[in-house]
Amino acid sequence: MDKRTAAKTAAELREKLNKWADEYYTHDAPSVEDSVYDAAYRQLTEIENEYPEVITSDSPTQQVGDNTLPGFTKVVHEIPMLSLGDVFSKDELSGFINRLAETDSVPFEYNCELKIDGLAISLRYENGIFVQGSTRGNGQIGEDITENLKTIKSIPQKLNKPVTIEVRGECYMPKKSFVDLNDARQRDGQTPFANPRNAAAGSLRQLDPKETAKRKLSTFMYNVADYDDLETNTQSGLLEELKALGFETNPGYQVANNFDDVSSYIDKYQEKRDSLAYGIDGIVIKVNDLNLHRTLGATVKVPRWAIAFKFPPEEAETIVTDIEWTVGRTGVVTPTAVMNPVILAGTTVSRASLHNPDYLEEKDIRIGDTVKLHKAGDIIPEISNYVESKRLQDSEKYLIPTKCPSCGSELVHLDDEVALRCINPMCPAQLTEGLTHFASRNAMNIDGLGPKIIGQLFSKKLLTDVSGLYELNFEDLLTLDKFGEKSATNLLESINNSRQNSLERLLFGLGIRHVGAKAARLIAQKFKNIDEIIKADAETIAQIDTMGMIIADSVVTYFSMPESISLIEKLKSVGVNMDYLGVSEEELESEDSFFSGKKVVLTGKLETMTRGDASSWLTNHGAKVTSSVSKNTDLVIVGTDPGSKYDKAVKLDIPVWEESRFSDEMNQES
Ligand code: IVH
């Protein structure tokens, strides 16, 4: 490449990279994969190395990527917050290590750490008290997010010693919270976050700390601004010292004495990656001797004593055979790509959400296309793009449906939202979804009333709304497929028992937008009776701790609709309890658990706990532990030598977790 072309290409790359960095860091909404950014960044570095005269001060190679958003007070980092250099293969890593060894008598002791997929934060403590927390920003100036950080449980308000110290680390969103948050966003017609890192960043940069509090963020701290604040002189010792002060540190670190140790550490975590409860996008290798950190120093952007080994993205190709549309409880119609099954990062994938019509149009996915798949945040299968060279000659643009796949009514976009909705209140798919939610475990807890039975009740016109459930009789139920006297009696009994539920179950079961089980409980606790809730204004509801105006407005809007009031009247007339009766500790504990309501089978020998311990922990967290695997099993946890239950789970396509994944989840929850 001649110098002119180099200058031109570098300028183009700078522009692209700066745009992508702005999308990623400032707006938490990347438009390209990390690997695409990394490749362009690398190309720019190569050009700049060959022609240093083309380097400009706005080149991303000269700056730390993040920026700051208006609305937050700025914080000047007295000691800059640096980024990390990247390598993408073991060859490149050994190059880095050899270069370090040449610089001086560097002893071969490295601390290997997990590279947590979150965002960097800095926490300042004076005499052991948390006084200020900030984002990295551009490395020199960040955003003051103290109040938001105070809502995160793993950040101590007071340290175990009255020290004055500035500690740095990563704030992240656990995978489970990421999946839950995206599910909720999708239900509400909002675009899901691309990965846990963007979700964490978006959650930390909420102007209202109450919003941050809802997002279940966590932290791992791994550094201090100034090593003079420490007693230890190694990076591994620093992690222990931070832990002793009361910070959460990642337990997965390991000191390596040679390149082979570093290499096996990388292999170990590349394999374990999917089973961790949080996302990692690589490994960070740091010189263990802190005195050498001072000697080696840093460039404007990255330290010379550490490097990040980035995991290669896992991708797979397959063919889209269909695009299915499903109608949710709130009428949002969502497209899903159905594909030939393919193995991706260890699991078989045959479906991927296409989120909403805009997304589908933008990606221009068509039936018959070969597509590249990856896992967003290591968990959710997502289509990256179609493969142009493999598009069929007679391929036709996919037409977004205009009619509801369930009831045939015209679909609409409300208030310019991207989501497509069916607004027919009598749409069978919506009613079925709504009733399934009403009957679900955290709502009215009607055992034995699943979507299949509900679908039949609607199609046989035995029901028109949830109140009709309480008017069903024995003969009605006998008309259902495979229903005998015993199943009819049992279901009638479950329905009948649910009349006595405490108010919060009904309130959650009504499916009011934004009102989850916890919000429903807090509202019921405060107002005690449905009529008091109906009368309440949004300001009074919003006074409840952690509630906020979004939930409050939604409750008021719901009860301002005559249909809602008439439904409540009908439910009253069929004897459904409308009073708050108090919640037992047990219910409180099981409510939020991932395992709540799930049927779990344990098999094989567990290493770190007995089967009995695992079983009682699961039961305490709301799971039902059963001994055999069937199509109703939600999860199989396997130890060593699992035997036929494991084979059956794989055959029935039931999620299988190894013990490590289970203990990670246990740690998250207990
Ligand atoms: S050390 C000067 N250690 O990765 C210290 N960073 O891509 C530099 N990260 O900016 C950071 N896990 O936000 C370090 N164990 C770890 C990390 C880690 C995640 C992040 C951090 C950094 C980014 C660079």
Image (cartoon, grey):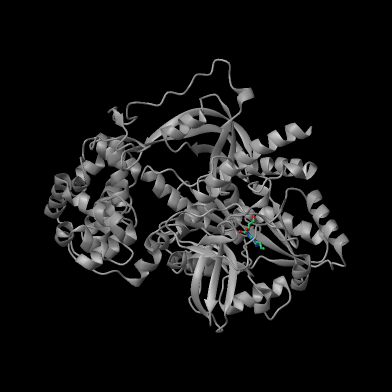
Q: Is residue 416 above or below residue 182?
A: above
In this rendered view, identify the residue nearer to me: 645 or 121. Answer: 121
Q: Is residue 412 above or below residue 112?
A: above
Residue 482, given in percent of the width and then of the height, sits at 33, 40
Image label count: 0
Locate residue 274 relative to residue 158 in the image: left or right.
right
Q: Quadrant of residue 168?
A: bottom right
Residue 603 visible here? no
Q: Quadrant of ligand 1?
A: bottom right
Q: Is residue 562 above or below residue 523?
A: above
In this rendered view, identify the residue nearer to me: 159 or 521. Answer: 159
Which residue is most to the top? 394
Locate residue 575 relative to residue 274 in the image: left or right.
left
Locate residue 659 relative to residue 484 in the image: left or right.
right
Residue 361, given in percent of the width and then of the height, sits at 46, 29
Residue 323, given in percent of the width and then of the height, sits at 46, 29
In this rendered view, identify the residue nearer to me: 24 or 550. Answer: 24
Residue 414, given in percent of the width and then of the height, sits at 30, 37
Q: Quadrant of residue 404?
A: top left
Residue 258 visible here? yes
Locate residue 300 relative to residue 168 in the image: left or right.
right
Q: Residue at x 30, y 38 (%)?
A: 415
Quarter of the picture holding the N terminus: top right
Which residue is most to the bottom? 162
